[in-house]
Every structure is written in structure tokens, then in C-alpha cells.
Image: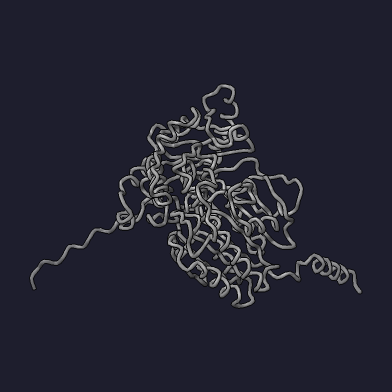
């Protein structure tokens, strides 16, 4: 046997022994829930009843510090499917308000996986414009289903898709819970709902009036119902015989729609549950590294051995699959733009292992979402407890001085908010004006400015910031938003649309 042949056989044997040639490409099951932070049993929440998600966490990785780039449904979903920040992909507000990607040819997970032979499926809402940019082969339950109708259909459609064919699949399942309305029971789930006497409000809200407790209980009931549906889905996967070679990822699309949660850059809005299981390939563990959902696209493409998409700001999570210390990012960035047309208040934020800085780009303005969120909570609380009367202003006024100050700051934010997350994990005390924190303030300001320049943030230009403000605030309702396209995808990067050619004059000469 010649030396080159021996070398080739040795190389081939090594590859086979490592499972490189023998292993089939993994299936990918991406499970997405609505509007919930890490209020799960596996994250230590004392009121959560989530045995199926707890079991999934025990069998894989629980990322203890996982975040979304923006705490909004469309914005977050566009980010984990493209691997980009909202200011990079363009979906800066809700799809239902006609906000959209800058370009329909931006690379995304279903397109990249489809290109290498994956079957692609979507169950539940996409919520990104244009939908045609995401070429799923299979799509069922296209709406949000906030009425929670026919909840068993999620598992039924999943079984149909998973069991059709032997080629590897990418299936994204998007459940309606725990989005409002927080229903105490739907489809008989949960079998034994919790009541307000059994729960307390999330600590980051800073208030916990009795009139709000039934609403909080129904939020937890929504999570319990979600957990049952996830259990049904995982049972479908197990019965298919494809569980061993399927990467299962579960995440919330952002934090709960509570006070100081959704539509903010606070931890209650951007911190999420993120679980990843890959049996035999991922060591069960808890990781404390700062991770973002923009890391999912490079991670899943690498696992599928798909060509990487150049220029993505995230990084593959594979170094965290084994136990032990890993050199990882020390800073993580989030942002906010708007939700519908009534929530425009752009922010940028950076955090490290201890401190967090939020920059409010329209400091001095009243935050338009503040009163709207208080009113929304009153309405939701009334649905859960019709005979109770919630007055959030009174509850805030009765809170501790630091909580009162936090809500006043949220109402009319300063330019900078600096928090020590070790000493103040719920972000009640702004340290930006304290001389002893001037050094860390300056450091984080520099890091934030560098990241914004590096990622080509269009709102670095004041003219874009103010033009977007005028454009969004000129729209009063969804009907108006849907009747005309937004202009920001053109003027953000100097791509103003060409003027329309002059209309031809009608020939008025009589013939």
C-alpha cells in the first residue's frame, strides 16, 4: 500500500470514528412562545408550573443570560431568522403596522437551509414583512390565534410535517401563549388554573397591588398551557423516531407585556428563556455567558453544515456545548425603535457582566408608551378580575422612593440610564449622574458608540432620527399605515426612491 493511500485511509477512518461522515444532518425544531420572560420552573420561578420545559432544560443547555435584540414580536422574530439587529434588517416595528425588512433578499434561516436540501415548515405566525422573503415549504395556522382555538392542531400539523419524508427538516412552531389576553383556561388547559392567592407580580415591576394578582395568575396559567402544548409537541417528535438527531431550541420572543417589560430595554423586556437540546451532542448544563438570539442563525447553519452568511454580528454557540470555561463576549447590545405608530421612542443599550447603559435618543420627550402601558394593564386586570379596580398610579405612588423614581424616569427618560445589575438587578437606581460611576459610564458610552458605528446604525444621523419621528407620528392608525409604504427603508441609507416620471398630458384634440 502506498504512503498516500495509507494516509487517505487513516484520514477516512478518523472521520468515520468521529461521526463526521456517518452522521446525517440534524433536524431543527425551533419552538417560539409569545411575550414571556424566564418565568419558568427551570429558571427558578416559584410560581411557574412548567414540567415539560423544565425537563427539556435538564436534557440540554439552559442559557441563564439570554436576550433578544428588541422587545417586540416582529422585530425579535426577524432578528433570530436573519441573525441581524433590527436596525440592520429593517423590521423596526410590527408587521401589522406595515413595517418591513429593508430588502426581501436578506439571507434568512429557511432560505439558507432550503438551499442545502432541508424541508422547511412553519406552524403559527411569521409576523415579518414581506412574508414572501421566507420560503417555507409548509405553513399551517398562519394567524396569531390569540383566541387559542383548536390548540391540539399544533401537534397534529407538526406530526404531519415531521413524518413526511426522510430528508432533514427545519420546523418553526410559534405558540400564542403567553400573549395577552391571558386566558385562565382554554381548551381545558391548564387543568387546574392558579389564582391570585397563589402568585405575586414579577419583581422587576416594583409594585404588587392585590387588584393585579388575578391577572398575574392568568399569565402563569398561560405559561402552564404553553408547557402542556410543548410537551405534546415533544411527544410527537419522540414517536417519529427522529428525536435523537433533532436539535430542539425553545425561546420566548421577548419579555412579558407587563410594566417595565415588553417594549423596553429593561431586563424585563429583553431577557428571555433560551433552551437548547441536542441529545448526545450537547452536554446538559447551565451557561452564564451573555448570549443573544442573533446567535441562533450562525449556530444552526453551522450545525447543518450550511454555508455561513458573511457579516452576521452574532456568533455560533457551539463552543458552549461542552462544559467548562470558554472565552466569550463580555458585552451585549439591545435596542428599541417602536411597536405600532404610538410607541416611537428609540433607545440603544449595552450591558456587560455587571453594568448596563441605556441611551434614550429622544431624551426630554415624554415616552408615549408609558401611559398606554398603564392603561393596558388596567384593562387586562379587569378581564381577570371584573369586580376589582386597579389604579396603577396609586400603586406606584405608594411604592418605595426608588420605585417611584424608576417610573418617573420611564415616563420622561434622561439621555443615559446606568444600572449596577449586581446590586440592583431590577434597574430601579440610575447611577449615570454619580461621580464614582463616571468611569464605567464613559466606557459603556464609548462601547455603545463603537457598536452603533460598526453596525451602521441609521439613527446615528440626527436627520434620520427626526425624520423617522415625524413619519411615524404622522400615522394615527393601522389603516393609515397599511395604505402607504414606510419611507425609512429608502432614506436611512441614502436610497431615496427615484421621482416618478411626469404624467403624460392627455390628448384633448378632437378627432
Residue shown at the point (63%, 71%) measured from the top left: 168
Q: Is residue 151 above or below residue 212?
A: below
Q: Given the current orientation, which residue lies at the most extreme right position?
A: 1
Residue 447 appears at what percent x and percent y? 57, 36
Q: How is the image coloured?
A: one colour
| Relative depth, front residue between 377 and 322 | 377
Residue nearest the observer in this picture, 456 or 114: 114
Position in image of residue 441 (x %, y %): 56, 29
Q: Quadrant of the C terminus?
A: bottom left
| Residue farthest to the bottom, as pictured | 165
Residue at the extreme top of the image, as rendered = 435
Q: Nearer the viewer, residue 317 or 197?
A: 197
Q: Quadrant of residue 443?
A: top right
Residue 24 visible to the viewer: yes
Name the residue: 46% across, 61% down: 104
Badge count: 0
Residue 232 placement (x, y as % from top left): 59, 67
Give left or right: position of 472 versus 90.
left
391 relative to 311, above or below = above
- Whether residue 99 is situated above or below residue 204 in the rendered picture: below
Report whether residue 464 is seen.
no
Query: Residue 75, image x and y in percent?
Result: 48, 52
Q: Residue at x 58, y 69 (%)?
A: 115
- Quarter in which the N terminus is drawn: bottom right
Amino acid at each position: 500500500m502506498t504512503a498516500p493511500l495509507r494516509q487517505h485511509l487513516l484520514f477516512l477512518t478518523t472521520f468515520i470514528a468521529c461521526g463526521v461522515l456517518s452522521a446525517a444532518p440534524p433536524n431543527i425544531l425551533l419552538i417560539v412562545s409569545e411575550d414571556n420572560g424566564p418565568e419558568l420552573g427551570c429558571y427558578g420561578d416559584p410560581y411557574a408550573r412548567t414540567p415539560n420545559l423544565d425537563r427539556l432544560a435538564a436534557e440540554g443547555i439552559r442559557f441563564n443570560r439570554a436576550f433578544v435584540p428588541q422587545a417586540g414580536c416582529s422585530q425579535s422574530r426577524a432578528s433570530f431568522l436573519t441573525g441581524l439587529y433590527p436596525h440592520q434588517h429593517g423590521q423596526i416595528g410590527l408587521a401589522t403596522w406595515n413595517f418591513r425588512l429593508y430588502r426581501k433578499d436578506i439571507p434568512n434561516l429557511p432560505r439558507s437551509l432550503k438551499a442545502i436540501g432541508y424541508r422547511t415548515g412553519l406552524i403559527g405566525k411569521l409576523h415579518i414583512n414581506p412574508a414572501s422573503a421566507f420560503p417555507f415549504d409548509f405553513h399551517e395556522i398562519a394567524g396569531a390565534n390569540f383566541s387559542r382555538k383548536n390548540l391540539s392542531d399544533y401537534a397534529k400539523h407538526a406530526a404531519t410535517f415531521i413524518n413526511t419524508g426522510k430528508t432533514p427538516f427545519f420546523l418553526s412552531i410559534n405558540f400564542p401563549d403567553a400573549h395577552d389576553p391571558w386566558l385562565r383556561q382554554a381548551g381545558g388547559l391548564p387543568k387546574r388554573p392558579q389564582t391570585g392567592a397563589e402568585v405575586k407580580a414579577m419583581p422587576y415591576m416594583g409594585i404588587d397591588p392585590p387588584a393585579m394578582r388575578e391577572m398575574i395568575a392568568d399569565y402563569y396559567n398561560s405559561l402552564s398551557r404553553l408547557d402542556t402544548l410543548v410537551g405534546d409537541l415533544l411527544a410527537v417528535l419522540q414517536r417519529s423516531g427522529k428525536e435523537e438527531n433533532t436539535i430542539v431550541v425553545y425561546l420566548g420572543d421577548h419579555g412579558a407585556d407587563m410594566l417595565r417589560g415588553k417594549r423596553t430595554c429593561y431586563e424585563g423586556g429583553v431577557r428571555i428563556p433560551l433552551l437548547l437540546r441536542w441529545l448526545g451532542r450537547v452536554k446538559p448544563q447551565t451557561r452564564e455567558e451573555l448570549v443573544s438570539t442573533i446567535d441562533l442563525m450562525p449556530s444552526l447553519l453551522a450545525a447543518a453544515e450550511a454555508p455561513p452568511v458573511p457579516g452576521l454580528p452574532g456568533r455560533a454557540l457551539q463552543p458552549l456545548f461542552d462544559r467548562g470555561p470558554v472565552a466569550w463576549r463580555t458585552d451585549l447590545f439591545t435596542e428599541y425603535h417602536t411597536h405600532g405608530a404610538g410607541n416611537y421612542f428609540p433607545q440603544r443599550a449595552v450591558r456587560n457582566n455587571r453594568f448596563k447603559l441605556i441611551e434614550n435618543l429622544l431624551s426630554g420627550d415624554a415616552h408615549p408608551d408609558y401611559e398606554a402601558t398603564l392603561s393596558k394593564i388596567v384593562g387586562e386586570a379587569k378581564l381577570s378580575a371584573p369586580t376589582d379596580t386597579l389604579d396603577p398610579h396609586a400603586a406606584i405612588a405608594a411604592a418605595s422612593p426608588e420605585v417611584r423614581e424608576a417610573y418617573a424616569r420611564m415616563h420622561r427618560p434622561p439621555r443615559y440610564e446606568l444600572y449596577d445589575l449586581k446590586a440592583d438587578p431590577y434597574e430601579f437606581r440610575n447611577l449615570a449622574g454619580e461621580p464614582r460611576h463616571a468611569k464605567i459610564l464613559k466606557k459603556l458610552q464609548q462601547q455603545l458608540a463603537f457598536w452603533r458605528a460598526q453596525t451602521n446604525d441609521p439613527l446615528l444621523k440626527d436627520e434620520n432620527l427626526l425624520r423617522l419621528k415625524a413619519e411615524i407620528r404622522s400615522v394615527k392608525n393601522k389603516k393609515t399605515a397599511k395604505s402607504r409604504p414606510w419611507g425609512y427603508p429608502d432614506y436611512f441609507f441614502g436610497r431615496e426612491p427615484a421621482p416618478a416620471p411626469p404624467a403624460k398630458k392627455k390628448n384633448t384634440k378632437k378627432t
